[in-house]
Amino acid sequence: QQPRAIPTGPSPLGLLVLALGSFGGIALATKLLAPLSGAWVGGAKLVFAAAVAGVISRTCCAPLEMVSTVMMCRGDECGSMGEELADAWRHDGMSGLFKGNGANCLKVAPSRGTQFLVYEFVKRQMVAGAAAGAVLSAGNRLVAGGIAGMVAALLVYPLEVIKTMLTIYPEECKATPGGAIGCVIKAGGVRGLYAGVVPTLIAMFPY
């Protein structure tokens, strides 16, 4: 009988300290930005709010996203969702449930911020080119959102590839973003960081 694997993830105390430090930094940045005004400051506030919301939402859903990525890439080799979650916990502890979450947060923060900024920019350009007092239609807003989604996806796509590599092949990638980049470049060169980007961009427009 094989010995039971001992979870190697961070301790609950370490996670608590990390969470408190993160929320403290967010609270401080919010307090500093609140009294400021101006066009550029408004954009910075928009990016900051989108980044915070994206990081929190992705981190809360990280275990489910990890299982989704594993089941999508490994297909019939996987068990049920519960079995995959239990297997990740058994082998890697808490860290196993959050494989790839660091790269995912790095991706989500600039992605959400870029998406909001591009969306607002495109809307303003549409309003400026329309007749005075004209209101944007649902179709115009759809186009603005589609363009914003495609720009954001193109900007952070390499991080999506890195996140997937860290989730599926953590040992080969040495469980670090740098290791994942090395694996991708070794296998497919720099172009490997953008493998599959075209269908992703097409899917992002209606999304």
Image (cartoon, grey):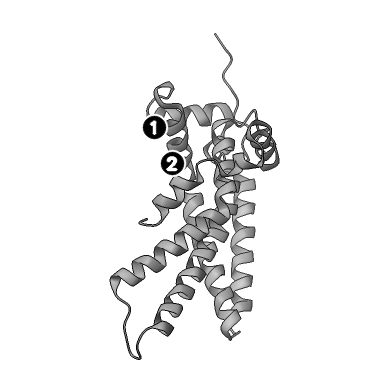
Which label belongs to residue 81? 1
Spot occupied by residue 84 in the image (x, y as percentages of width and height): 44, 29
Furthest residue in direction left, as rendered: 138
Residue 153 in view (yes/no): yes
At horizontal 34% and vertical 66% (from top left) the residue drawn is 142
Which amino acid type corresponds to the residue marked 2 in the rendered image?
Leu
At horizontal 31% and vertical 82% (from top left) the residue drawn is 135
Going by the image, does 206 lie left or right of 119?
left
**Placement of the C terminus among the 4 image quadrants:** bottom left
Q: Which residue is mark 2?
A: 64
Going by the image, does 68 lie left or right of 20?
left
Residue 34 in view (yes/no): no
**Placement of the N terminus among the 4 image quadrants:** top right
Tell me whether the residue at label 2 lies in contact with that at label 1, contact meaning CB atoms closer than 8 angstroms: yes
SS assignment at label 2: helix
Q: How many marks?
A: 2
